[in-house]
Structures are given as C-alpha cells and as structure tokens.
Amino acid sequence: MLFTAVIPCYNEEANVPDIYTEILKNEEYFKAHDIELEILYVDDGSKDGTVNEVKKLAANDKRVRLISFSRNFGKEAAIYAGLENSNGDYTALMDADLQDPPSLLPKMFDEIFTGQYDCVATRRVTRKGEPLIRSFFARRFYRIMRRISKTDIVDGARDYRLMCRGMVEAIVSMREYNRFSKGIFGWVGFKTKWIEFENVERRKGETKWSFWGLFKYSLEGIMGFSTAPLAMASVLGIVFTLIAFLAILFIIIRTLIFGDPTNGWPSMACIIIFMGGIQLFCVGILGQYLSKVYLEVKERPIYIVKERI
C-alpha cells in the first residue's frame, strides 16, 4: 500500500530536512508492513529557502514531491492542496516544525490497521511552552464551538492525523473557499480514534501564527460551522425592543402620576449611542456572513501552483 505524508510549509527552511529524517526513522516499520512511502511538501509561498531544501531532498530521493504556490494562500489552502494531490491509500497530515512527532506514525498505523477506524487523530493533553493567554483563549474557543456547533471539534486537536482514502476524498470534495479544516474533519464524519500526546515545542524557527491571526482563524471556524451569531443578533434585537417598550411605559406612568416631565439629555445621548453600537454590531455580524458568501460565489481557485516536482 502507498502512504503519503503531506507537509504544509511556510518559511520552514531549517525544518524541512529534519522532518524528512524523522519520518525515515520509521522505515523499518514501513518495510515490515509493506508500506511504500511518499513525502509531499506543499510550499505556501515561502520567502526563504524552503523550496531549495525540498529540491535537494527530491534530487536524492524520488519519493519526495513538491507543490509550490505562486504566493502565500494560507495553511488551509496548503492542507487542501496536499490532500488533493495525495496518491496514498493512507494519508497523514503533519506540520513541518516537528510539533507533530513522526514517531507516532507506527502507533497510528497499528490503530487504523485494526479496521475499526477510518482516521487516527492526535490531540495535545498539555500546552506546555505555549503563552498562557493563548492557551486560555484556545480552550475558550473549543468550549464555545462545542456549544454552538453540531460539528465535533475536540479540545487540543491537532491537524496531525492519518486518514483512509475515503475520508481524504470526502474532504477534497468540499471545495469551499473559506476553509476551517478542524471543523471539516469533524463534519465529514468517519470513525476516528484519538491519540493523546504531550505538547512538543517546534524544533527550529518561530511560529507563523500571531494572536490576531489565531483570533481571525477562530472566527472562520465559528462562522463556517455555526449560525449562532446570526441568532444572537436576532435575540439582541428582541431584547432591546422589549427594554425600550418597558422604558416607554415607565415614562408615561411616571408623567401621569407625578407630572414629572422627561429630562436629562446626557442620559438620552448615551442611550442613543449605546443602541447605535448594538445595531452596528449586529450589522457587522451580517456583513461577515455576507462577505463569506461573496467570496464563495466568485469561485476563485483555492490555490495556484507555480511549480511541481
């Protein structure tokens, strides 16, 4: 059988040879189970020497393949390109920074060979080495997603997973432009076995994810797999309509009983500004969903390939 290791890369020049070496440490296992290997690097428009490092490996090992984008399309596009161009009966998706340990591959294959599972996925049980504020908001995000979405998204889940051909084809069939792979993995279904491991810090280089980038990515997940924000906007409208109605009744009754005219323009100005803010917030939610529709109907390609090996 053929096994494809898909490795999205963005400015990972220093890590490209290392993950290649770590994957090859499992060669004895692959030979014992009659597994042919191919390693597919997907370069997401890197600005360093990532492509050159992959070319060096490909020159000495015909099992190494490369897809290089014309520009940076984002990790989600790189994941999609890797899965779409995977030839394997089984495909593993893993990061180039070695935070997804290739040493887990034999254990993942052992689980999938039992025939009970279509996918073996990994999740971190600790976030050691990660900034505390990022860990806090990450956990809140997973908790929110479990409550507002029907898609199964596990806390600490990594993109690192081994999938059968059927699951890969199901994911590739979802050609949506705004992608959130963690949600897509859960949405397509298929029986999944979870393997837990301790957090591993990246081998070399620095993370490409800023806090703001992760925040925007989380919004992609919420809007891609839940309509709860739209419902929240509707609820806010109903609540503030009732508050306004009760306030009107209060003013009328107070004026009839006490003869006290309505006064206080500063408080009125604050109320108007507050209500205007709520309205803009709700319009903003609608705008975000509308922008996703706008991008989808254009039917632009998810990625553009500049070079292949």
Image (cartoon, helix red, strand yellow):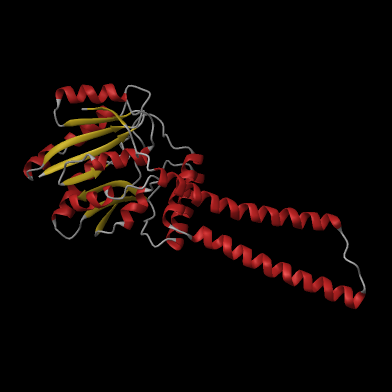
Query: Observer-nearest residue: 170 or 198?
Result: 170
Which residue appears at 22% of the width and 49% of the height? 169
Left or right: 216, with 110 as reference point: right
Q: Position of residue 193 (x, y in %)?
A: 25, 57
Quadrant for the N terminus in the image:
top left
Whether residue 184 is visible here, answered yes or no, is yes
> Could you say which quadrant of the image residue 150 lies in?
bottom left
Number of numbered discs visible in the structure rendering: 0
Which residue appears at 44% of the width and 37% of the height? 209
Query: Observer-nearest residue: 66 or 103?
Result: 66
Farthest residue to the front: give it. Answer: 298
Which residue appears at 16% of the width and 36% of the height? 38
Q: Position of residue 97 (x, y in %)?
A: 33, 34
308 shown above or below 2: above
Q: Position of residue 21 (x, y in %)?
A: 21, 31
Whether residue 125 is visible here, answered yes or no, is no
17 shown above or below 198: above
